Image (tube, coloured by chain):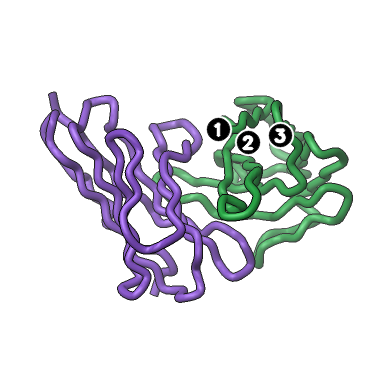
Chain colours: A purple, B green
Amino acid sequence: QKEVEQNSGPLSVPEGAIASLNCTYSDRVSQSFFWYRQYSGKSPELIMSIYSNGDKEDGRFTAQLNKASQYVSLLIRDSQPSDSATYLCAVTTGFQKLVFGTGTRLLVSP
Amino acid sequence: GAVVSQHPSRVICKSGTSVKIECRSLDFQATTMFWYRQFPKQSLMLMATSNEGSKATYEQGVEKDKFLINHASLTLSTLTVTSAHPEDSSFYICSARVGTGGSYNEQFFGPGTRLTVL
């Protein structure tokens, strides 16, 4: 079982819709959870971090964490074509390192 | 967020040569930096953790004699790919951990270096 799992997609949504990205992780001791956005040929950009159960909102982005289910998600409201990218879920290990999922490719059509 | 730079952004070299990649934290001091490698359509794989003033910690399967890491100051870490071969061609990305307390594990990435070995 992979440590961090994501659906590779692509996830296609129309402009203005809500995009929902999901991630599960296997290590129960993980304490920190991150969403990174990566455009093709570029390095990852941190867009959200979440450390406790529940929701965390930042502009059009909402991260949701459920440690009991070992599940973290990212919602993007009012999706824009510029949101089209690969979204990487990352989770810390017990050794304070980040483990990345393989990413979900999001396509927002005008 | 914190700004991390990398140089060069792209390098093409012949097989057998060595390539040095620099990673700098521009507006903060980074006691810990990380080096990742990403192959096409794959996720980031951690190669090593670079700690200022001490030896780097390499992940399993990463040859420390081939990928030399030096973290001589709080703002600079270097990765040297020695005797590069075509299979070393990849996208190399560094990151720095800047937070304290609850945000301790946030990492900010440099723009990456695309290495092509002919």
- Residue A101's disc number: none
Query: Residue B10 in the image: x percent, y percent?
Result: 61, 26
**Mark closer to the chain start, 2 or 1:** 1
Can you identify the residue that label 2 sits on? B117
Chain letter belonging to callout 1: B
Q: Secondary structure at mark 3?
A: strand
Residue drawn at the location 35% of the way across and 44% of the way down: A87
Percent x, y of residue A60: 27, 35
Distance in Å between CA atoms under marks 1 and 3: 16 Å
**Residue A10 image position (x, y, % from top left):** 22, 45
Q: Nearer the viewer, mark 2 or mark 1?
A: 1
Q: Position of residue B54 (x, y in %)?
A: 87, 54
Specify the quadrant of the image occupied by residue B55.
bottom right
Q: Quadrant of residue A86?
A: top left
Residue B2 horizontal side relative to residue B15, left or right: left
Q: Which residue corresponds to mark 1?
A: B1
**Could you confirm whether marks 2 and 1 are on the same chain?**
yes
Q: The disc numbered 2 marks a residue on which chain? A: B
For disc 3, the chain is B
Look at 39% across and 32% down and name the residue there. A40
Q: Which residue is mark 3?
A: B23
Of mark 2 and mark 3, the one earlier in the sequence is 3
Sort mark 1 into few (<14), some (14-19) or many (20+) by Cα contacts within 10 Å.
few
Q: Amino acid at mark 3?
A: Cys
Q: Quadrant of residue A62?
A: top left
Q: For the point 72% across and 33% down, which residue is it?
A: B28
Three-letter residue code for mark 1:
Gly
> What amino acid is found at the position of numbered circle 2 in the picture?
Val
| Residue A66 shows in the view | yes
